[in-house]
Image: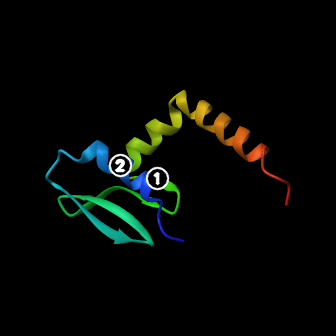
């Protein structure tokens, strides 16, 4: 499956003013590279963010995690059973 162009466009809109970013097709998706390093991207219909270990730990401890999980539960719960 190709990556979602609408999501890619939304990422582009956030970083469009930064000339240090380039794009590169990776993992069947599109990566946004900063100074040669992957920063963020889109694979199929999923956003990928490179946060590093401390960033991931902070994101998982943040109260917004409960909101994200709630949204995931609501979405997944509405899918037909397998």
How many numbered circles are shown? Answer: 2
Picture residue at 65% right of the left edge, 37% below the top = 71
Residue at image coords 78%, 44%:
78
Identify the secondary structure beneath mark 1.
strand
Location of the N terminus (image quadrant): bottom right
Query: Is residue 51 something that shows in the picture?
Result: no
Task: Give how far across and how far down residue 48 sits, in percent.
Answer: 44, 54
Label disc, if present, on residue 47 of the rendered structure: 1
Q: Nearer the viewer, mark 1 or mark 2?
A: 2
Vertical position of residue 65 compared to residue 8: above or below = above
Which disc, if any, is residue 27? none
**Residue where numbered disc 2 is placed:** 11
Furthest toward the left, the residue is 19
| Foreground pick, 46 / 67 | 46
Q: Is residue 38 visible?
A: yes
Where does residue 31 sit, x and y in percent of width and height?
Answer: 34, 62
Pointer 1 or 2: first along the chain: 2
């Amino acid at each position: 499956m190709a990556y979602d162009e609408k999501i890619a466009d939304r990422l582009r809109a956030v970083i469009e003013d930064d000339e240090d970013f380039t794009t590169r097709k990776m993992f069947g998706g599109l990566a946004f590279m900063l100074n040669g390093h992957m920063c963020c991207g889109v694979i199929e219909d999923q956003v990928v963010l490179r946060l590093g270990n401390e960033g991931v730990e902070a994101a998982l401890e943040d109260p917004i995690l409960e909101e994200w999980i709630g949204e995931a539960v609501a979405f997944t719960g509405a899918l037909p059973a397998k």
